[in-house]
Image: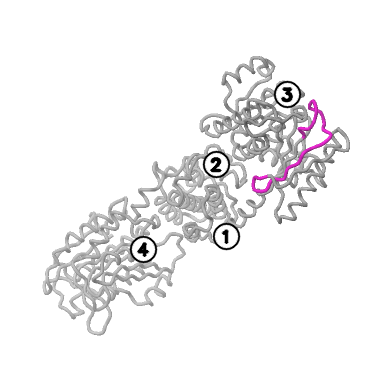
Amino acid sequence: MLVVATQCRSMSTLTALEPAARELANALRDPGVGGCDPGLPGGESVLYGELAAPEIEAAVRTSISRAAENGATLVLALLGHGFTPGDDPTLYLMARDSKNGDRSSAVDVGRLVGEAVDHVGVKGVFVIVDACDAAGAIPPASTLTIGSSSGKTRLALLMAAAVNQPAYDMAMSRELVRLLDAGLARAAPHLCLPEITLELREHIAQQSITHFSYDGSDSYVPLWLSRNRHVQANMSPLGSYGTAELDTALAPLNLGGLVGPGWTLVDLYRLHEEIAQAQPGPARTRAASLVERLILAHRTASFLRSFMPAALTGTRLRQAVAALNMAVSDDQAVGDVHTEIDAAEYVARNAPTSRGACVKALTRFVVELADDAGWDLNEPELRDWATGINALVALNDAVHERCERRAERRLRLIVSLHYALADDWPEQIGAWLLHDQAVYEHENFDCPGSDRPGTETALANAVDWAEDHADALGLPLRRIEVAMPTGLLLQWRPEECAYERRLGVDYDVLPRWSRWLERLPDTRRAIRSARRRLTEIASITEGGRLDWIPARQAAEQHRLDEDFRNGVYRRGVGLLASPERNEKLFELLLRFAPIVVWPDSANIGPEHQKRVEDSWNELPLGFLHAYRARWRDQSCDEACDPVADLRAVWDDEEWLAFCDALLPPPGHKTRST
């Protein structure tokens, strides 16, 4: 950086010149703002006073050479009196002995700017001209588009006035310092020419702030003047997992250990520029790709903080991440997501490597989050964010997909075997089709025999009945909930029933406990207790969401009953050994815990417990996804997801609300005849 502030003896003294020049230089050298190094040897960055024209030109050329040696962008500020001679629109900066209209006594600004832009090794040139007739500083087009760089040049010109227009009291330089110091709301992490110009125009009315830019490079990062302090003050540092992966990716480029504490989006942009200078190869490609993904993640996190800050809860973030059904991360579980930075980085780092996959994944994540929070998916702010990261098509696709899945959730089929006597197979099953959580139709279906084949036939008939109604409504049927008494929960898997293919291949089949549908005196009280437990489990942020009970402890049912009644167990319950046909134990667990997980046949180990906790936000449908994977590949027993070894009864608010709605109102008495 070099700031040249020159006084001319033949013109009036510019009293605001020196303070404006020094304040501008200080802002541009501030590591948190411009981050510029001095343009002259000895640490000098400001030339001020009655400077001779050759002195100015020599200093500018020295700065050009220093920028080229360092492969850096040159920031050049020229402040003082200026003129354009006659009809010639070329700007001349007036030096100590310059005369108005005398080209030979002044500095040809356009020529100097052209030399800087076309100098081999200079990455780009950002020029600030605060003088009368400043718009005459634009160099010839041929210098930018042909020259020794073959047009791969970058220039940003900020000019205080149009040609034949005066500039007053260093107003642009002083207002620019204010802008750099405060930053700009609703702007990117770096302040570039267009937004700087628009902001200055809002505060300077007496002269026409003008800008010009040319970019023939293939750089990923736009040419910027300073970091945006407003955005930086509201940015979060990199997450621990993103930092660790970035350090690993930078090591082969001899950039390992570069990532410091508190690194933010601004630093990622700078790092991307440094990586671009590394030796081409797979290591550079990997590092650049990771930085680009993290940049997208942090721009997304910043947007979420401004767009829907009140909706950013840990539970909602984890659910939005889990809804993407991404491949399991090797180093980070979804359960470790606690902040918007954690979530956005998780999605960005684990998205597929194909072109555009990261943008699509982040867009789906934002749509999941916004829709879950009740936001209108057509909000203009959402579209502005998507346009800013080149994701408008991805946003439209994600919104369309979300609307389709929302339609899938509008219908639910609930089938219950609670008519069974003594936990045996029933003679009849009940079926309720729910539309938007309200009962749309109810029907009972006879079982050809009070056995498993007869029950499965009745279940298939109930599905046919529900599909006919779904066709009439023009909505898809996706979710089927099958409520069973305790004994059948331990021996029957309704998702494996034949319905052309297994029922669970095409439908999300969830097992339920049918006791909540029985009109017993304490059912409403038990449902209320289950709802309370669900709320407590959802609020857990530290430790597991399940209390795992070993076989020895499960055998002491009297003690277990006392522990439940005394509030010892306040989470869900997981059994480490199969309950086999122990209905008494299972009845106890289901009465006190809304979530019960158990092994289908053998005992389970720590890997099962860890996988349940890591994939918590994907459950209970995650169990069915694991079953489907095992069905598709019968040889994958050991390689398959460990949750495929588990069964679960997993109550949720929708299920409990349905059960509660079927109960007679409080105080209702059955009339005797």
Q: CA distance from mark 2 to mark 3?
A: 31 Å
Say if 16 sits above or below 437 in the image: below
Q: Considering only order in the chain, which callout, 4 or 3, is on the residue closer to the N terminus? A: 4
Q: Considering only order in the chain, which callout, 1 or 2, is on the residue closer to the N terminus? A: 2
Query: Which amino acid is tagged 1?
Result: Asn
Q: Secondary structure at mark 1?
A: helix
Query: Which amino acid is tagged 4?
Result: Glu
Q: Secondary structure at mark 4?
A: helix
Q: Which of the 4 quarters of the picture holds residue 36?
A: bottom left
For mark 1, does the 10 Å Cα neighbourhood hold few (<14), some (14 to 19), or many (20 or more) residues?
some
For mark 2, does the 10 Å Cα neighbourhood hold few (<14), some (14 to 19), or many (20 or more) residues?
many
Q: Secondary structure at mark 3?
A: loop
State the image coordinates of residue 128 (x, y, percent, origin top left).
28, 66
Of 38 and 412, nearer the camera is 412
Q: Considering only order in the chain, which callout, 3 or 1, is on the residue closer to the N terminus? A: 1
Q: CA distance from mark 2 to mark 1?
A: 23 Å
Magenta region includes residue 131? no
Q: Considering only order in the chain, which callout, 1 or 4, is on the residue closer to the N terminus? A: 4
Name the mark nearer the viewer: 2 or 4: 2
Q: Secondary structure at mark 2?
A: helix
Of 493 and 75, nearer the camera is 493
Q: CA distance from mark 4 to mark 1?
A: 27 Å
Q: Is residue 345 visible?
A: yes
Of 493 and 15, nearer the camera is 493
State the image coordinates of residue 176 (x, y, percent, origin top left).
27, 61
State the image coordinates of residue 664 (x, y, percent, origin top left).
67, 34
Stretch of the chain drawn in magenta: 417-438
Q: Which residue is mark 3?
A: 579
Q: Which residue is mark 1?
A: 396
